[in-house]
Image (cartoon, rainbow, N blue to C red):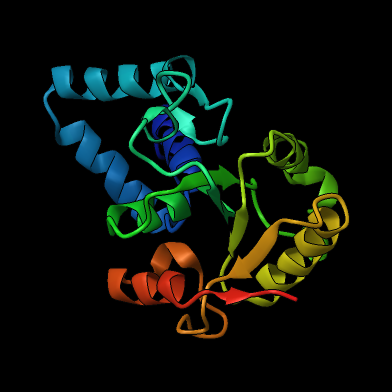
Amino acid sequence: MHPRAPAPLKALVEQLARLPGMGPKSALRAAMALLAWPESEVRRLGSGIYGLRDALRLCSRCGGLTADDPCAICADAERGRDMLCLVAEWDSMLALDEGGFYHGQYMILGGLLEPLAQRDSRTLDTDRLLRRLAEGEIRELVLALGATLEAENTASFIQRLVGGRFPNLKISRLAQGIPLGAEVKYMDRETLRQSLQYRQELS
């Protein structure tokens, strides 16, 4: 950015550039677009961003983002209670649930094991998972973590973690219709449906 650009504009561009998929040029375009908006719209956007952290919390059941606890999915009495689908992130849960073919419970792990990014088992929400399984209503744990190397390593870790503690628990994974290296949140509905329908039991 030009060194003589106004300091407030430079500060905003620097913050916007930290968002995923937003480089310095895209951030500058977004900032300029905001300047062209009516003042009321800009203030409404700013207020929404400011209040976001206060308005949202983590669901005590699944760990997903919600305004109410439990979230709408966990509070839905029509959903099955014996199957738990474990996903890495909240947007992966949304991708699976939007298809309308899965009617069980969810749990968000909070990421994947990524040693190079200093993400080890302590960064995963395994305590919530173990507490949920200890309640005794879950009969099958579906690992819907993706097909990346990090997802494979995380799935192996989870299988070892829960396998010994819950010997009667069936552990399965999404079928390999998901391409190698792909993330659940980027898959189309039909691929997700078939992957879930033809999930594979882990030995």
Which residue sits at x=40%, y=27%? Answer: 75
Please state if 123 lies on the left or on the right of 26 as rendered.
Answer: right
Q: Is residue 196 left or right of residue 83?
A: left
Q: Is residue 74 above or below residue 93?
A: above
The picture quadrant where one finds residue 34 is top left
Q: Is residue 3 visible?
A: no
- The reply, left or right, for residue 191 in relation to residue 151 is left
Q: How many marks?
A: 0
Which residue lies most toward the right here?
164
Image height of 34 relative to 203, above or below? above
Query: Whole-percent x and y of residue 116?
Result: 81, 65
Q: Nearer the viewer, residue 15 or 66?
A: 66
Of 78 and 157, nearer the camera is 78
- Residue 47: where, in percent of width, then height? 32, 16
Above or below, 50 relative to 165: above
Residue at the spot 52% in from the left edge and 84% down from the top edge: 176
Q: Is residue 139 left or right of residue 79?
A: right
Residue at left offset 36%, top offset 31%: 76
Q: Residue furthest left?
A: 38
Decide which of 182, 193 is in the foreground and name it.
193
